[in-house]
Amino acid sequence: MRRSAAIATLALAVATSAGTAQAAETRGSTSALAAAPSCVKVKVDTGIIARTAYVKNHCSTTKRVKVRWSFAPDSGCNTLKPGQGFKTKRGLAAQFDGLPSC
């Protein structure tokens, strides 16, 4: 009986430490992405079957940004020279969740 209790305790300790490491990794990746500067503008349109985010760099310097979505994959990191823009489209379930620098 003591052996099975020791195994159960060990399994719980391993599972707990794995969950803690995963949570720390997730927090680290989220905090590393600062918000894009205010001179980079985004407009999100909701269509009948999709959402489209239009991003444009109104800054005087080149910026790297990506569109963060909830319930859909984020866009890739885009390098925008002054005056450049890009658009990204996701399904209707997607919700705009921010415009971080990358």
Image: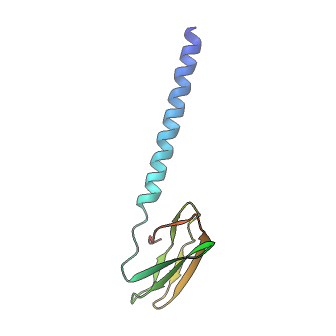
Q: Which residue is drawn at 46% across and 79% down?
A: 42
Query: Is residue 93 placed above or below 24 in the rendered structure?
Result: below
Residue ranking furthest to the front: 48
Q: Nearer the viewer, residue 71 or 77?
A: 71
Left or right: residue 60 compared with residue 45: left
Vertical relation: 78 (above or below) 8: below
Q: Nearer the viewer, residue 18 or 35?
A: 35
Q: Which residue is drawn at 52% across and 86% down?
A: 85
Residue 62, given in percent of the width and then of the height, sits at 45, 85
Q: Please provide percent x and percent y for residue 98.
A: 45, 68
State which quadrant residue 89 falls in: bottom right
Residue 29, image x, y percentages: 47, 57
Q: How many labels does the image show?
A: 0
At a point 43% along the width and 65% down the height, the residue shown is: 33
Q: Residue furthest top?
A: 1
Quadrant where the image shows the N terminus: top right
Residue drawn at x 43%, y 81% as measured from the top left: 41
Residue 39, horizontal then vertical, whole percent: 37, 83
What kind of colouring is applied to the model shown? rainbow
**Front one among 33 and 54:** 54
- In this view, the residue farthest toward the left is 38
Q: Quadrant of residue 99?
A: bottom left
